[in-house]
Image (cartoon, rainbow, N blue to C red):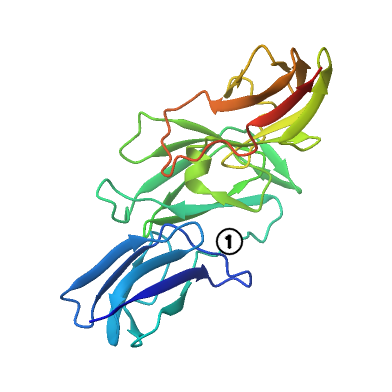
C-alpha cells in the first residue's frame, strides 16, 4: 500500500476566494467508521494528509458560523498526489437600509461549545430624547434573541450609547458605544478589546537621530470599530531599550525621542486582560521599530 500527499485548500465563496483558517478537517472511510486523519487549516486555508492511494474517502468540515457541504467524497488516485479546493460559505455581513443605523450581528455559544439558542440580550438607550431626521427617538429598551444557530442581529443608531444586559448575567451591565459603521460584530460591541493602532505617517519603521523628537499622529481602535484616541488608559506602552528610545503619549499622538544610537521597539499591550479572545492576537500595527542614528 502506497501513501500519497493529499492537500485540501479551503476558501470562502467571495470573488476574492480568501483562505479560511481554523477549519477542522476530518478524513474518514466512505462508511464513516474509520478515521484516517484530523487537523485544522492554517493561515493559508490548507490542511494536509498522507493517505493510502487508490481509495475514496469521506471528508467532513467544521468551523463555527461557517457553512460547508458535509460530508464530501474525495478520491485519491494511485501513484500521484492530489489537491482539492473546498468552498466555505461565510455569514454575509448585513447592511441596514438606513444610513443612520449600524447592524450588530454575530453568534453566541454555550459552555459546551454548542449554539446558544434563545439567549436574550437587552439594549437600553442612554440618550433621552434623540432627534433623527425629524423623528423623535425616546429612551427605551429593546431585546433580541439568538436563533437555533446562536445567531443574533439588531439595528442600533450609529454614535449612540447603550446599556446592555444578557439573560443570566443581569448583574453585569455593559456600556457600549456604537461605531460609525454599517455593521459590527455584536460580541465585539458588547465585549470590545483594543485591536489595532495606526500612526501618521504610517509605520512600523522610523528613523531619528540622538536628541531628535519626532511627533506622530496616533489612533487606537477597539475591536468594535470605536476610535479610542491614543489609547491612554487602554494601552500600556513600553520601550524595549530605554537607553536608545524614549517616548511621550498624548491624547491624539505620540512623540518618539532619540536617546542613544541603536534600534529599539515601542511596544503596546492591552491594559485590560479580563476579556479572553481565542486566538489571542496581539494588537495590530505594533511594535514600532525605531532606529536612532548618532
Quarter of the image holding residue 269?
top right
Name above or below for residue 31 compared with residue 44. Answer: below
Task: Depth check: give the residue in front, 245 or 3.
Answer: 3
Name above or below for residue 125 compared with residue 94. Answer: above
Residue 143 appears anywhere in the view? yes
Q: Quadrant of the N terminus?
A: bottom left
Determine crowd level at label 1: few under 14, some 14-19, many 20+ residues with C-alpha closer than 10 A.
some
Q: Quadrant of the C terminus?
A: top right
Task: Depth check: give the residue in front, 13 or 45.
Answer: 45
- Left or right, 110 with reference to 85: left
Quarter of the image holding residue 278?
top left
Total labels drawn: 1
Task: Depth check: give the residue in front, 139 or 3.
Answer: 3
* Residue furthest left in the image: 33
- Left or right, 79 with reference to 204: left
**Circle 1: element type:** loop
Residue located 37% across and 47% down the image: 120
Residue 285 x %, y %: 65, 38
Name above or below for residue 191 compared with residue 93. Answer: above
Residue located 59% across and 19% down the image: 233
Residue 22 x %, y %: 42, 57
Q: Can you identify the residue that label 1 sits on?
A: 94
- Left or right, 17 with reference to 263: left
Residue 84 x %, y %: 44, 78
Quarter of the image holding residue 3?
bottom left
Residue located 51% across and 69% down the image: 11
Residue 148 appears anywhere in the view? no
Residue 239 x %, y %: 62, 19
Amino acid at each position: 500500500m502506497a501513501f500519497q500527499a493529499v492537500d485540501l485548500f479551503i476558501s470562502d465563496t467571495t470573488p476574492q476566494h480568501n483562505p479560511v483558517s481554523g477549519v477542522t478537517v476530518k478524513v474518514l472511510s466512505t462508511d464513516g467508521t474509520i478515521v484516517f486523519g484530523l487537523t485544522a487549516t492554517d493561515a493559508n486555508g490548507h490542511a494536509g494528509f498522507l493517505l493510502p492511494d487508490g481509495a475514496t474517502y469521506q471528508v467532513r468540515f467544521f468551523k463555527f458560523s461557517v457553512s460547508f457541504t458535509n460530508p464530501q467524497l474525495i478520491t485519491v488516485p494511485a501513484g500521484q498526489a492530489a489537491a482539492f479546493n473546498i468552498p466555505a460559505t461565510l455569514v454575509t455581513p448585513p447592511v441596514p437600509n438606513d444610513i443612520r443605523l449600524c447592524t450588530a450581528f454575530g453568534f453566541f455559544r454555550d459552555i459546551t461549545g454548542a449554539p446558544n439558542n434563545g439567549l436574550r440580550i437587552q439594549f437600553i438607550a442612554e440618550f433621552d430624547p434623540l432627534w433623527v431626521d425629524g423623528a423623535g427617538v425616546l429612551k427605551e429598551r429593546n431585546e433580541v434573541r439568538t436563533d437555533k444557530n446562536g445567531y443574533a442581529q439588531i439595528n442600533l443608531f450609529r454614535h449612540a450609547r447603550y446599556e446592555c444586559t444578557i439573560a443570566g448575567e443581569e448583574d453585569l451591565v455593559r456600556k457600549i458605544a456604537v461605531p460609525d459603521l454599517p455593521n459590527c460584530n455584536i460580541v465585539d460591541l458588547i465585549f470590545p478589546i483594543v485591536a489595532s493602532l495606526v500612526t501618521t505617517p504610517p509605520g512600523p519603521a522610523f528613523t531619528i537621530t540622538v536628541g531628535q523628537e519626532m511627533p506622530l499622529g496616533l489612533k487606537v481602535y477597539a475591536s468594535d470599530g470605536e476610535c479610542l484616541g491614543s489609547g491612554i488608559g487602554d494601552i500600556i506602552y513600553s520601550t524595549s531599550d530605554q537607553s536608545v528610545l524614549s517616548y511621550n503619549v498624548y491624547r491624539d499622538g505620540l512623540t518618539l525621542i532619540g536617546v542613544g544610537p541603536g534600534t529599539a521597539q515601542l511596544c503596546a499591550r492591552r491594559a485590560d486582560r479580563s476579556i479572553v479572545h481565542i486566538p489571542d492576537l496581539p494588537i495590530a500595527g505594533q511594535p514600532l521599530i525605531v532606529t536612532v542614528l548618532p
